Every structure is written in structure tokens, then in C-alpha cells.
Amino acid sequence: MRGAAMSDAHKPARAGEEGTDAAVAVTAPRVSTTERVLRVAVPLVMIVLAVLAWDLVVTVNQIPRYILPSPADVAGSLYNDWGTLFPALLVTLRITFTALILALIGGVAVAILLVQSKWIELALFPYAVILQVTPIIAIAPLLLIYTDTQTTLLTCAFLVAFFPILSNMVTGLKSVDHNLLNLFDLYGASRLQTLLHLKIPAAMPYFMSGLRIGGGLALIASVVAEFAAGAAGQGAGLAFRLLESQYRLNMPRLFAALVLLTATGVAIFGLTSLIAWLALHRWHESAVRREN
Amino acid sequence: MRNVSKIFSNGTLALNDMSLSVERGEFLSLLGPSGCGKSTALRIIAGLGAPSSGTIDWPASRLNAKGLPQGDIGFVFQDPTLMPWSTVFGNVYLPLKLQGMGRTSATPRVMEMLDAVGLADFASAYPRELSGGMKMRVSIARALVTKPKLLLMDEPFAALDEITRQKLNDDVLRIWRHSGVTVIFVTHSVFESAYLSSRIVVMKARPGQVHTDIRLASPEEREANYRTSEAYRAMTDTVSRALQDAIHAGGSNVRRS
């Protein structure tokens, strides 16, 4: 075997013919259809069961609808009050997504700035800590003095979503394989090349967890900030509709608003998870099926 | 490389007055006990970290801003050091991309190198889908894609199993013969160095210095079953003894200080 390899070596060898490592790519068997169906069915059945149990509790105990409405009441309210709830949903969605996008741009930009030099990092460090440890919602009443409600809500949601994205991105940009950095040095890569071709791709998994956390927090912050700011009237979001329903003891509508908020949260989670999967599934351990 | 010394920031004297002149087309192994500064010497040659004193002279060629011959050095690390987010093709293309070569014009060269290491079928695979030996081959292809004059290898096969290692040794020898590249190969294996090299420099530790300089019959003249031959056995004997000497020399030095 060794002799053969050696004599091969004198020809302009095509190494594929002589490898301990020679391998052929084989397409892996797909996940079975039953498992695919079950994957969707199991969580769905669990939700249906929970709704049925809720309905049963309400009917059996004859709980009045101003204390706990039945699922049917909530569905009815969702249909009948769509005219009020839908514009409110749009307002909440607009604030959440504008805040999230601004936080993504800002978080990534500031993170890139921070890792450029330790002096920049040192100079901006106190601000980062102060803004991070302050409960941002507490500054909502203050912001209201300077700007209108919408800007206040947007600022709060932005600040809350900003920090997980920033700190994840900074960690990601810093945790680049040192030997890869050496390699880029060796080939005389410019700072921009190192950033684009090495640091940013290496930071992608960290960015994705920042995105997932930030997406959830942006929604929470836009709701809580609305509570704190006491927004009302035409341009109000779902949080105001929640409070309003509670004052009026309109429990079905309160539940309907809650369902919309939950659905929004689930949608954001699904969307950010999908983006993370699309970006990472080819190479990162977090998105790859474990095979042994 | 003349009178190079390197003192680390923690005060360790890693290299002391080390002088070494490497000739074109050589396969030079740096052999020595761990901690003798062989990797440090290699990194200084590559320009990763400047020497504390001394100079490195290059034969006249295009030097870049850092005084290194641009694009003339390939480096293979102990780990494959591949970018996990990039395909095998992307990893090998990297040095050319950093030099500003377009993907289309680089493709023939990248594929030629992948072919030379036997991985042409795996161009679109990701590093995590490859075995340790295959990753190392990608790393070697990447180091050679710029057609460097000098290939530096820092214990590249230390983490591989014996069979894969012998296989890759043969591959490296074959590539060296065909391309005429100068290789500096850091290893702590007597057998590996005796098998591959045209010249072995044994280093001693604390402080790192050249201890013995052994020239071998050129590997080009070695017959097919060199690994089991008497000449090879004799050579490993000589090298082992030189290494033992170097270890003792380094040891006595420590006791004196």
C-alpha cells in the first residue's frame, strides 16, 4: 500500500485515486413522513386541548364572561371588534418593527465601532453600562415631556432591543479564531477586508441570538412603554386597548387583544428563528442536526 | 535570518541569537523539544510578530508595507484553521480574494489546487462535513494557491492519526517535488522529519538556538520503500541522537541559570 503510494507520487498524481480520505458524498435519507406530520400535529393538539379545557372550566363552573370569557366569546370579540383592534395592532407592529430595525442598524454599527480600538470602547463603556442597567421604561415619563407619545414609545422599544444586539455583536466580533486573524495578517488583508470576510461572518451566530432576543424585547418594550406613557385615543396601540377593555370590564376584548399580542410575539419568534436558520444551517452547530 | 532573538512580554527568552539561512528549494525541518521556540521562529519568519532584535533578510523580491514578500509565503497552522461558514472552495479562494482576484479568474487555480490534494469533488462541501485529514488538505491547498516560494508548516499533522499522517506526508513530498517550493516544516517527530526533509535543523530549548544542522541525501533520490529501508533507520538514529543531545544541552542551561 505504501509502496504503491510512493510510486504514484512520481507521476503527476491525481490524489483522489490513492486516499485514506477518499470519500463519496451520499444523499442522506430524508426524515420520514410520519415524523414530519407528528412534528406539526403534536404541538397543535396540545393547544387545542388547552382551549378545550378552558372552555370546559368556564361552562362547568358557569363563570360569568366579565370574569373569564369562553374561547368562543374571545373569538367573537376578535371578529366583532376587528375595527378597533386591527388599527391598534398596526400601531404596535409599526413601533415594534421600526424599533427593531433601528436597533439592528444601531447595534451592529456601534459594535463595529467599539471593536476598532480599545480607546473607543473605553470611552463609550460608561454610557453602555448606564443605559443598560437603567430600567428604560422608567424614562418614558421623562421622554414624554420632550417629545410626543409615538417617539417616546419608539425610543423605549429601541433602547431595550438595542443592548442585547450590541453586546452579542461585540462578543461575536471579538471571538474570532486567532489563527484566522493571523492568516488574514499574513496575506496583508486590510481592516475592511478582515471585517467583511472574517469578523462579520464569525459574529453571525452571535448576531442571530441578539436578533432573537431583541425581537422579543422590542414587542415587550413597545407594550410596556405604552402602559407607562399612558397613550390614548386614535393613535394608540394594543396596550391601550387592553387597559381600556379592563376599565370597561370588556373581558372578551381584553382577551382578544392579548391573543393578538401573543400571535405577534409568536410571529416575531418564528421570523427571527427562520432568518437565523437560513443564515446558519449550512455551517453552524446550533442549526445543524446532530448525527452520530 | 540573522542573530534573531525574541523576548515575550512575560520576560521569557524564547529565541537567543538564532541564525539560519535557508536555501531555495530546500525541505527544511525544525526539530526540537517542546518549548524550544521552533514555532516562534516560524512565526517570526512569517512576519506574525516581530523579533525583539535581529533581522530577517529576504532575497530581492517584491516587499509589501510590512517588509514581507507579498504573496510569497504560505502558512499551514497546527489546526486546519478554516472558515466554517465558507465552503472548501471559498476557503481555498480566500488568499486570492484578499489579493483582489475575481472569483471567475481564480476558479481554475483554486480547482487545480483542490485537484492536487484530491478534494476536487468536495469544492462545495463545508468544513464540518470533512474529516480531520481532509480539512488539513484544504489548509494545504489554501497555503499553496498563491503559488508561494516559501511554505511554512507549523506541526501541521501533530493532531492526526498515524495512517492519515503518513498519507499526508507522502502528499506533501509529492507537492514539494512537483512545485519546487521551499518548505520549512516544524515538527517534534524524529521519524517525520527524517522521512520528509532534505535538511534537519535540531534546536535546543531555553533559550531557543540552533543545536545541530543535518543535511540529508535529497528525498528525490529515495526509493519507493524508503520508510522500511536501512538508510532511513540509520537516519532516524542520527537524528534521535542529535535530539537527545539538544535536550541535554537545553537542560544543563536551565540548571545553570
Image (tube, helix red, strand yellow):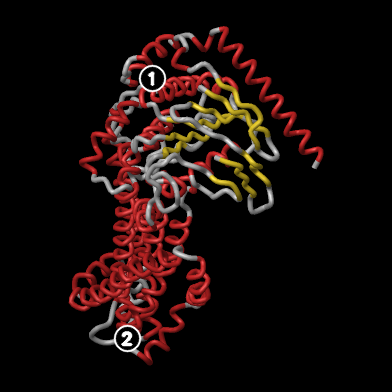
Taking the image as shown, residue B29 lies to the left or right of residue A291, namely right
Q: How many marks?
A: 2
Q: Is residue B84 in view? A: no
| Subunit bearing disc 1 | A
Residue behind mark 2: A149
Sequence order check, earlier mark of 1 and 2:
1
Q: Position of residue A77 (x, y in %)?
A: 23, 72
Q: Position of residue B81 (x, y in %)?
A: 45, 40
Between B20 and A46, the one lying in front of the other is: B20
Residue for point 38% across, 92% down: A145
Which of the 4 image quarters holds residue A143? Answer: bottom left
Which of the 4 image quarters holds residue B150? Answer: top left
Name the residue type under label 1. Gly
Residue for point 44% across, 84% down: A139
Answer few, some or many: residues within 10 Å of disc 1's Cα (few below 14, many 20 plus, some between 14 and 19). some
Q: Name above or below for residue A164 compared with residue B187.
A: below
Considering the numbered disc 2 on the image, is that residue within a helix, a strand or a loop? Answer: helix
Name the residue type under label 2. Thr
Residue for point 31% across, 18% down: A12
Q: Name above or below for residue B215 compared with residue A146.
A: above
Question: In which quadrant is the N terminus of chain B drawn?
Answer: top right
Which of the 4 image quarters holds residue A240? Answer: bottom left
Taking the image as shown, residue B177 lies to the left or right of residue B96, namely right
Residue behind mark 1: A19
Whole-number angstrom distance, CA of label 1 to CA of label 2: 69 Å
Between B231 and B94, the one lying in front of the other is: B231
Taking the image as shown, residue B190 lies to the left or right of residue A269, namely right
Question: In which quadrant is the C terminus of chain B drawn?
Answer: top right
Considering the numbered disc 1 on the image, is that residue within a helix, a strand or a loop? Answer: loop
Q: Position of residue A197 (x, y in %)?
A: 35, 51
